[in-house]
Image (cartoon, helix red, strand yellow):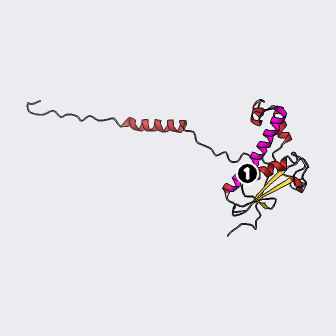
Amino acid sequence: MPLGERRKRTEPEIPSASLADIAFLLLIFFLVATTIDIDSGIGMVLPPKLEENQQPPPIKERNMLKILINDQGQILVEDRPIVSLRQIRDEVKKHIMNNGQDPNYAESPEKAIVSVKTARNTPYRVYIDVLDEVKLAYREVRDMVARQRFGMDYLTYRNRFAKDDPEKDEIRKLIPQKISLAEPDPGTGGGQ
């Protein structure tokens, strides 16, 4: 190399070939490590489907508590307007625990049915709130029965038994949760 001639210096480079591999590995890591919330919906057990020519079982009027939610989200219990959601819970509890005393409510907890009917444009929030109040009423009644019979709340009572223990269902058999979700009338609340 002659004097005065400069040596060409090579520029330092960052090897970029492995960046794609690193990005791919990070993508796989986040796909595996990320949990995706799955909406579980409303936890309800639907009754078995009736046979084609089978009629639904007859139900006495007094055993069914009718709750209607109209298009504006107004709630009627047995055709009486309800001011607060708490009233629904009280009405349902009274209906379940009537034991034949008041002829306007159920004959027994086993026969008590709560029917929730909506219109086509019922606000979804009101519908869910009403369902929550009905379920809370059942929960409070079961809690009360568990305290009377076993001296503990319903959740503690249930947690004492194994998952498939038949004795676990004793309170559920005494206070079965029967909620009927009626379909909206086709002529009400269409709004179109």
Q: Main secondary structure of the magenta part?
A: helix
Q: Nearer the viewer, residue 58 or 72?
A: 72
The amino acid at mark 1 is: Arg
Residue found at x 80% / y 35%: 147
Residue found at x 88% / y 51%: 106
Above or below: residue 79 compared with residue 46: below
Q: Position of residue 29 (x, y in %)?
A: 50, 35
Task: Please indicate whether residue 17 sits to the left or right of residue 147 in the image.
Answer: left
Residue that label 1 marks = 86
Q: Nearer the viewer, residue 119 or 12?
A: 119
In magenta, the rendered stretch is 126-153
Q: Residues within 10 Å of mark 1 (few under 14, many from 20)?
A: some
Which quadrant holds residue 78?
bottom right
Q: Position of residue 77 (x, y in %)?
A: 79, 58
**Quarter in which the N terminus is drawn:** top left
Residue at disc 1, secondary structure: helix
Q: Nearer the viewer, residue 139 or 85?
A: 85
Q: Is residue 129 magenta?
A: yes
Residue 112 seen in the figure: yes
Residue found at x 39% / y 35%: 18
Which quadrant holds residue 124?
bottom right
Q: Nearer the viewer, residue 83 or 72?
A: 83
**Quarter in which the C terminus is drawn:** bottom right
Q: Position of residue 171 (x, y in %)?
A: 83, 38
Q: Position of residue 34 (x, y in %)?
A: 54, 38
Residue 53 seen in the figure: no
Residue found at x 87% / y 48%: 98
Q: Is residue 3 magenta?
A: no
